[in-house]
Amino acid sequence: MSSNTDFLLSIEDLTVSFDGFKAIEGLAFYMDKNEMRVVIGPNGAGKTTLLDLICGKTRATEGSIKFKGKELTRMSEHRIVWEGVGRKFQNPSIYEGLTVFDNLEASYPRGRGVFGALAFKRDEEVIQRIHQVAREIQLDDKLEQEAGLLSHGQKQWLEIGMLLIQDPELLLLDEPVAGMSLSERLETAELLKAIAKGRSVVVIEHDMEFVKSLGGKVTVLHQGKILAEGSMDALQQDKRVIDVYLGH
Amino acid sequence: MIKLPGFLHGRHGGLAGILILAAILMIVMPAMLDLYRLNLAGRYLTYAFVAVGLVLCWGYGGILSLGQGIFFGVGGYAMAMFLKLEASDPESTRIQTTPGIPDFMDWNRITELPWFWVPFNSLTFTIIAVLVLPAAFAFVIGYAMFKRRVSGVYFAIITQALAVVLTILIVGQQGYTGGINGITDLRTLKGWDIRDDSAQYLLYYLNATLLIGCVLLGRWVLNGKYGRILTALRDREDRVRFSGYDVANFKVFIFCLAAFMSGIGGAMFTLQVGFMSPSFVGIVPSIEFVIFAAVGGRLSLLGGVYGALLVSYAKTMFAEAYPQLWQVMIGAVFILVVLVLPYGLASVYQRYGKRAVAKLKGSRHPGDTPTPPAASVVPGARRDATAKAGSALPHDSVTEGRP
């Protein structure tokens, strides 16, 4: 099977089995450049596993994941990041003991080796970039605050900011609005739409209102396979989707 | 996720603290202690190299090594081998069956200097070996472990096992290593008698200078981006990995740096004490090193130095009188510190000493809650503690002095 190199991400025949249990089975998944894609599905459908496979946290049993024509299934995690894939975890995963500024700096894509990090200088370019990203995630007035003291929503934004500073071509977001208040959800939807300009974004989400507000194509996963794909409006009419997910 | 208390944040080791340490080591202690006790303090300070290394790799990197004795031993043995060869010239060993080789080899019916001893005839090679070998050992261990994502308690157990292996190897290969007695009877370095008074003073100052150098090096490493990544990966390894860092390399580096410092400590130990033996390699010393760092404060480079001084001094005081009890006591101290003072004496200073100092100075920044450097030492609690150690030392009735 030849993969289409026009896609930014093309996943084919992907299978991962944990002791015989197939969390993902024969999956095919394609993403265009600058596409916003939402992945929904019931618990245990394999949504988080799919993101884990793309970013290298879990290794595929079979199949291929090609990103810009390069095979990711055997690439080490940090190389995948260097290729331009950013991953946000489900629970806000930030360095709570460091300031917001330091959190962003720790993700700055220079000084990634041991000796590069030792020689790293906080120059004007770095400071400018950190301020720029902090403005995008609305934390520019909290740069010197300890990250552990931020609200839950702000922690989620900070982690998104830590990915943005690397300017990834593909952003993988696992439930970015989980635990957020309604107003925070609305703001996050705006933020995601803004950062989706010029890059591809995969969002896993349960909140249907939020999914609708994002727009874009939706993929429904069920038992490790793709059940349906299309616009949210079309999927809401789909009998199978209603049966396994939306109806409940 | 280890949530750091606020007072432990910020830069690592204020320069003021380092200056005070330098003053204590270079001026106060030599002025207050007679040569014998100064030499004893110098020996304790060689342990401080290991403790400072542990603050870096355990406190900041989250890598608990229970095998730092390995690196202390490698550095110490490298230096001891050079000194032993110098002490074993054909003239002074003429009564042996094979003159010109170390005495313990002759006793074990070895008739030729083993190949791995030969390069230690050169002082240049020896100094390079002291600086490179411990880090090289650490690189091999660290690379093998961290690339396979071995961490936490598994790593600790493996390092402990390696310390045992090395001890057994040294004890078992008596003819090549001097066995359980170690390498003893070391006298001169390039003809310079390391046992006379002026040499003892000089070595003490060299030791103190190197130690302060290591503290400064550690401070520099922690203050940069590397230090923040190191702390970050201790708390959130996955986030660091998926931010594009090869986590294993960062761990290997800090483990090697800790080993490098330990090796210097070992070599300075040999020079000041005049022997090296497997009892400074195995589990017991390795765990003692960890206790030094824990008592001093595992997030404080300077705390590591004071911890090594205080605990070693306490050991000298009590171990002679109650050798069996000491093991229990040091264990109790360790548990107590973990339970009550997880950040060691440094945190006591940060909590109370700093406030007292501010009061003395008259608060210049009212309302400004200080988030002082973790390792800064200023006239507070810790100077008192050290002064206590200093003034108490003279009453000390010796222990395992020089052989």
Image (cartoon, rainbow, N blue to C red):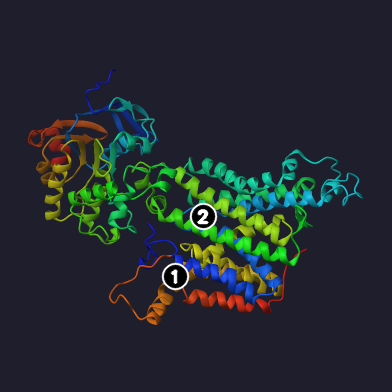
Q: At x 24% / y 49%, what residue is drawn? A: A128
Residue B357: which quarter of the image?
A: bottom left
Q: At x 25% / y 52%, what residue is drawn? A: A158
Q: Secondary structure at mark 1?
A: helix
On the image, the x and y values in percent for residue B279 come to: 69, 58
Q: At x 36% / y 27%, what residue is drawn? A: A62
Residue nearest the observer in this picture, B11 or B236? B11
- Is residue B113 rendered to the left or right of residue A44? right
B327 vs B181: above or below:
below
B8 vs B262: above or below:
below
Residue A13: which quarter of the image?
A: top left
Give the class, few, some or many, for how many residues have Cα within 10 Å of label 1's Cα (few <14, many ≥20): many
> Which quarter of the rendering shows the N terminus of chain A?
top left
On the image, the x and y values in percent for residue A120 come to: 38, 47
B338 vs B116: above or below:
below
Task: Give the residue type that dot 2 points to.
Answer: Leu
In this view, the mark in front (2 or 1): 1
Task: Give the residue type that dot 1 points to.
Answer: Ser
Q: Earlier in the sequence, mark 2 or mark 1?
A: 2
On the image, the x and y values in percent for residue B77 come to: 70, 51
On the image, the x and y values in percent for residue A197 come to: 15, 38
Q: Chain of mark 2?
A: B
Residue nearest the observer in this picture, A44 or A103? A103
Residue A166: which quarter of the image?
A: top left
B32 vs B152: above or below:
below
Q: Are marks 2 and 1 on the same chain?
A: yes
Q: Is residue B372 visible?
A: yes
Q: Is residue B338 visible?
A: no
Residue assigned mark 1: B347
Residue assigned mark 2: B64
In the picture, the disc for residue B123 is none
Q: Chain of mark 1?
A: B
